[in-house]
């Protein structure tokens, strides 16, 4: 695509800062984090006898915990959810890290099993592992349609926080459709995330976010961090929605990689560009994939992206967040600077699909 010179509109609104979040992965013996969401409520009974709601809690915990495992590598511990009857288990990419094999503790038991990592997709912080022996005996969880999740639903978070195996916490769905970055050097950006008030603790990452219909509606991944004090913000956690989990896990199981995601891509590798003052001021293009959106739009290594449509871009995180708002196939206007020019050029790109 040809490009034309123009000044980047000074009125481009700066992207609102996302709430600070972090992966609480257990590295070097410290556990990985979690979250929960979903559910429907029942009516309460009289004092001295179990209520209908309590019975729903007991039934759901008894059913879904049988599909939640503990996952351990040489330097991290987290949780996972049995995905199918072939021994495949879905978890977070940050739980397995760079490991090729992991140890799995069976649900509600003590038996240790070996599993192979068959694929990861770090942009969505998802991975699939496969138990080598007796994997077919594991009970698959029932994954819901996360589009049906509504604010106010009761949810249960199941996993292994702080080494306390088979633990359950409760909360409600606080919000849906959040876009949150994992920070701490991670390139993961969770789109359509489910926010929950359920307690988030290290070791729950990769576990189950469950409604009271015994269905997994998300995979707990993040806890919000207090900007000034540090530490987890009480009652603010995030989970990857089950629709995303099913899409990515299905491709990893079939091909060992993701060939088509719901995430838009420019087809570049990039890094933050710094201004003369040392502050981030755009995104420097490091390389351009042949045949990708950026290549077709005429972008080259060394160009600095400073805007997408009417949104000012000052960092790679901001670019990722803006692209996450669009589905693949969307045409967008890219504002960029070439060779240190004082004015920005513009070009039009048709966004591709993010792949492994």
Image (cartoon, rainbow, N blue to C red):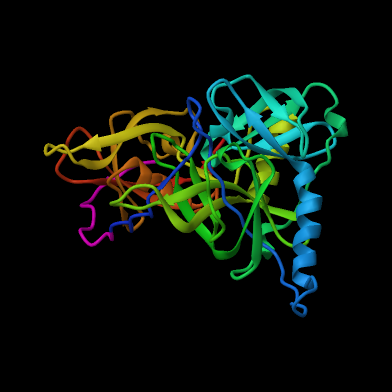
Indicate whether 120 appears above or below 61. Answer: above
Residue at 55%, 39% in the rendered image: 162
Q: Which residues are magenta?
A: 1-13
The C terminus sits in image quarter: top right
Q: Quick check: can you spot residue 42?
A: yes
Residue at 71%, 28% in the rendered image: 104
Indicate whether 202 appears above or below 170. Answer: above
The count of marks equals 0
Query: Residue 295's spot in the image, x, y percent?
Result: 43, 33
Q: In the current view of this chain or complex, which residue is farthest to the left?
A: 277
Q: Nearer the viewer, residue 252 or 336?
A: 252
Answer left or right for 143 relative to 312: right
Residue at 81%, 42% in the rendered image: 140
Is residue 12 inside the magenta stretch? yes
Answer left or right for 209 relative to 322: right
Most common secondary structure along the magenta stretch: loop
Query: Residue 164's spot in the image, x, y percent?
Result: 62, 40
Answer left or right for 17 relative to 210: left
Q: Quick check: can you spot residue 325?
A: no
The N terminus sits in image quarter: top left
Is residue 10 inside the magenta stretch? yes
């Amino acid at each position: 695509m040809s490009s034309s010179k123009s000044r980047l509109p000074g009125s481009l609104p700066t992207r609102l800062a996302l709430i600070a979040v972090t992966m609480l992965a257990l590295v070097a013996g410290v556990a990985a984090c979690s979250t929960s969401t979903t559910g429907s409520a029942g009516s309460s009974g009289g004092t001295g006898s179990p209520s209908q709601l309590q019975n729903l809690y007991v039934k759901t915990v008894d059913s879904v915990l049988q599909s939640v495992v503990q996952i351990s590598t040489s330097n991290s511990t987290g949780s996972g959810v049995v995905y199918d009857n072939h021994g495949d288990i879905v978890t977070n990419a940050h739980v397995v890290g760079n490991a090729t094999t992991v140890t799995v503790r069976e649900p509600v038991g003590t038996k240790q099993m070996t599993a192979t990592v068959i694929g990861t997709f770090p942009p969505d912080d998802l991975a699939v592992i496969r138990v080598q022996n007796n994997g077919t005996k594991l009970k698959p969880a029932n994954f819901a349609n996360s589009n049906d999740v509504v604010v106010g639903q009761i949810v249960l978070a199941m996993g292994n926080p702080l080494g306390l195996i088979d633990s359950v916490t409760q909360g409600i769905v606080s919000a849906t459709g959040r876009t949150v970055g994992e920070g701490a050097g991670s390139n993961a950006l969770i789109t359509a995330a489910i926010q929950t008030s359920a307690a988030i603790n290290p070791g729950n990452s990769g576990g189950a976010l469950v409604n009271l219909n015994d269905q997994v509606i998300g995979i707990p991944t993040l806890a919000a961090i207090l900007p000034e004090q540090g530490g987890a913000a009480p009652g603010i956690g995030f989970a990857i929605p089950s629709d995303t989990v099913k899409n990515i896990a299905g491709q990893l199981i079939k091909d060992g990689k993701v060939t088509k995601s719901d995430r838009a891509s420019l087809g570049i590798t990039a890094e933050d560009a710094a201004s003369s003052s040392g502050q981030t001021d755009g995104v420097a293009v490091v390389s351009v994939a042949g045949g990708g959106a950026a290549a077709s739009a005429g972008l080259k290594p060394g160009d600095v992206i400073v805007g997408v449509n009417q949104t000012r871009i000052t960092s790679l995180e901001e670019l990722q967040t803006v692209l996450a708002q669009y589905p693949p196939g969307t045409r967008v206007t890219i504002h960029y600077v070439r060779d240190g020019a004082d004015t920005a050029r513009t070009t039009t790109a048709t966004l591709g699909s993010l792949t492994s």
